[in-house]
Image: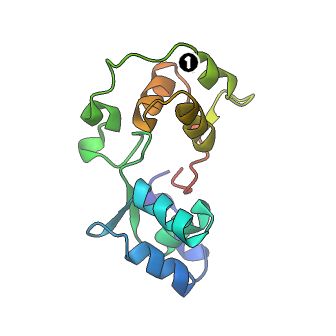
Amino acid sequence: MGFEDKEKFKLGPVDERTTRAIRSRLSGAVLTCASAMAAADEGGADPLDIGRGADALGIRLTVCQLGLFGFPAGVKGWVYAEVTDRPVPSGFEEAVRAACSAEGGISCAALWDAAERFAVPRIQAGYVADSLGITVRSCQLGAF
């Protein structure tokens, strides 16, 4: 779902603490995924609340840590990070497949967990999932 498609004004008001956390981490007029997650971690907030707050404030999330969105010209982030030719640890692809839901997708959080267990950069994990035909669902920030 694109930013323009979100029903941001139905989300309700954003509390001052969340607003400050978001605004203090803006890069220009956008909020990177890493900055949004840092705001959630440091403030003890649910990442989804930070994402919804950004939506309600009209702030775009960008530079997804899995490489899925927010890169120039709609190019996937793994192209910029040049991870497509990096070796993948043995067992990682199987772990990604095993973490899939019955519908065939994998949640952002589950993919992050697999990446951490196998010491794979998140952006490479996004590439691996994509190359396996696995759709990442349920963004922790609610971007999709």
The residue located at (49%, 30%) in the rendering is 119
Colour scheme in use: rainbow
Residue position for label 1 = 93
The answer to whether residue 28 is above or below residue 121 is below
Q: Identify the residue at horizontal 63%, vertical 38% (top origin).
A: 110
Residue 100 picture quarter = top right
Most distant residue in the top direction: 90
Question: Where is residue 124, by image quadrant?
Answer: top left
Question: From this viewpoint, which residue is outermost toward the bottom?
Answer: 16
Return the x and y of residue 113 as percentages of the image width and height. 60, 37
In this view of the protein, can residue 7 be seen by the observer? Answer: no
Taking depth in this image into account, of 101 and 8 the one nearest to the observer is 101
Q: Could you tell me residue 121's position as x and y percent? A: 42, 34
- Across and down, in percent, residue 133 comes to 52, 21
- Asked whether residue 86 is in view, the answer is yes
Numbered disc total: 1
In the image, is 111 to the left or to the right of 4? right
Q: Report the front residue among 113 and 106.
A: 113
Residue 57 versus residue 124 in the image, above or below? below
Q: Amino acid at mark 1?
A: Glu
Q: Residue at x 41, y 36 (%)?
A: 123
Secondary structure beneath dot 1 equals helix
Q: Is residue 140 left or right of residue 36?
A: right
Dividing the picture into quarters, in which one does residue 78 lie?
Answer: top left
Q: Residues within 10 Å of mark 1 (few under 14, many from 20)?
A: some
Percent across and percent down for residue 128 are: 47, 24
Residue plotted at (54% across, 65% down): 40
